[in-house]
Image: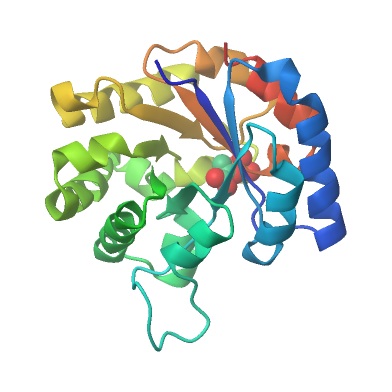
Amino acid sequence: MAKPLIAGNWKMHGTAVEAAALARQLVENEHSCAAVQLVIFPPILHLGLVALELSGSSIALGAQNMSEHESGAFTGEVSADMLKEAGCTYTLVGHSERRTLFGEVDGTVADKFETAQRSGLVPILCVGETLQQRQQGLTLDVIAEQINTVREKVGLKNICSGVVAYEPVWAIGTGEVASPEQAQLVHRAIRELLGSSGVSTSLLYGGSVKASNAAELFAQPDIDGGLVGGASLEADEFLKIAQLMT
Ligand code: PEP
């Protein structure tokens, strides 16, 4: 069975020197969470440098975003093949900040998922509802729509061979975490949506995960790992979270 995944999304934080130092600290201490697969998502510009720090370690590298296009006249974009060449094995697709701040719609997210897999990257599909959608009782409908758009594009087998991260938008970077019961309910619904093909699909929870709340979340039967934002910028805190996933 695959190791549980703990992913660290560094977002747009840190200088190159800081990124290398953080990666080095993780490498020096990765033995403390050997039962877990760590994957870090530095800013794109720091990927090459961080890849050098990770060489010889079992920590994987991922991209926070990628183009849905394979190549061409797309100024400012980065392709899946370029990310692979830089050492990535994972990519986030459809992170809520991409959806809400940069207008990424479900169709684009589905295209990115397909392009990532075609290039051999493992896509981590991020899904989640806004606070307003939750208050309107639409959480499961929103999640189903986000997942089904990708499923229609790539097929059930392919979506199941990726990773799905449930990240309630209201919990990202807010300090407000979903209760373990709220998170489990959505994870269970995702598992049911994926059916028998999704039994071993890795389902991550993300949204203000910290060492102080991770154990309860990770104890839920359908939570297989975590996608960590702010708390992944401190090596000690990130490693503590990973140690709780055993
Ligand atoms: C994220 O960026 O995916 C995330 C979950 O952020 P945070 O942990 O800071 O809420």
Question: Could you tell me residue 51's position as x and y percent?
Answer: 68, 51
Q: At which x and y percent is residue 158?
A: 22, 42
Q: Is residue 184 left or right of residue 57?
A: left
Q: Nearer the viewer, residue 137 or 79?
A: 79
Residue 141: give x, y in percent of width and height: 21, 42
> Residue placed at 41% from the left, 69% from the top?
67
Q: Residue at 63% x, 31% y: name it.
A: 58
Horizontally, is 137 left or right of 18 in the view? left
Q: How many marks?
A: 0
Against 158, residue 225 (above or below) is above
The image quadrant where one finds the C terminus is: top right
Where residue 77 sits: x, y (%)?
49, 77
Colouring style: rainbow
> The N terminus lies in which quarter of the figure?
top left
* 162 relative to 215, above or below: below
Q: Residue at x 54, y 56 (%)?
A: 64
Q: Which residue lies most toward the front here?
A: 56
- Give whichever of 149, 83 is nearer the camera: 83
* Residue 15 visible in image: no
Residue 11 visible, this orientation? yes
Ligand 1 quadrant assignment: top right
Q: Residue at the location (26% across, 30% down)?
A: 190
